[in-house]
Amino acid sequence: MSQPPQIQFDLLANARDSLRQAVELLAWKDIGSDHARLKHSITNAAHSIELLLKERLYRINPAFVWENVDKYPNLEANTVNVNTAISRLKNIGAVMFSEKDENNIRSLRKTRNAIEHYEWRTTEKEAKIIVGNALSFAFSFAAEQLGIDLAADFKQDDTWRSLIEELYDFVRIHGARLEAKLRENGEYPSYCDACGELTVPMRGGSCELCGHWQIVDDA
């Protein structure tokens, strides 16, 4: 007799799923109110980031995911929180975080706790900045530290395009991050005709942010 199918999400699959929920809530407006979508996208993005940090720790040593490494792999014991994960990644894994990213991640954790455990008040503008920062970090951390292009998951249909059209704060924040990366690599990027960010490589080609193909005039 065959066994019933099992539901299973490893760390990365779990992170990926929560990130997808966050992005789709922002990209598509067919469920709930704008404020409810922002709230749930923030909690999903925060969950995804926590799991991505743990995945990076796991790749160093699986025991580091546990708060008390001696209790690995007891699933009834606590795993690390975001603050401990960042500390271990910095001190043991030599993973670098900018001060801005570190502050944003810690603030995101507090926001998530407020949403999940008590009450939450903010402006719509601030909520969009919070989730814009969170998504930008998640995509960048996955690419740089895990070697995974999570943005590609949303470029197979119109989700990525819709996200860019709906969330300007993400476009601005992630565009600036991608521009900085291009400059670190010796590029002098050009403005994209489609999304307006400095994210087109100096020799032209596909915009690093929106994917628009653009020819750069050498003159």
Image (tube, rainbow, N blue to C red):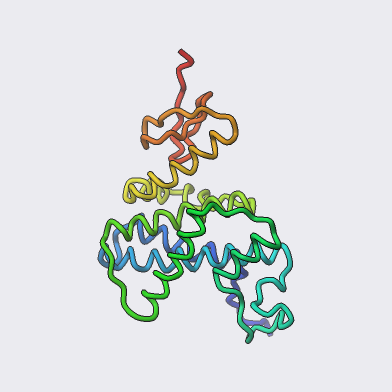
On screen, 39 above or below 137?
below
Q: Position of residue 48 (x, y in %)?
A: 51, 65
> In the image, 98: left or right of 119?
right
Q: Position of residue 4 (x, y in %)?
A: 61, 81
> In the image, 122: left or right of 15?
left
Image quadrant assignment for residue 73: bottom right
> In the image, 21: left or right of 56?
left
The quadrant the N terminus occupies is bottom right
Residue at screen point 64% across, 85% down: 77
Residue at screen point 42% across, 69% down: 43
Residue at screen point 66% across, 72% down: 65
On screen, 185 above or below 110?
above
> In the image, 32: left or right of 55?
left
Observer-nearest of 16 and 139: 139
On screen, 202 above or below 86?
above
Residue at screen point 32% across, 60% down: 127
Q: Position of residue 25 (x, y in %)?
A: 36, 61
The quadrant the C terminus occupies is top left
Image quadrant assignment for residue 89: bottom right
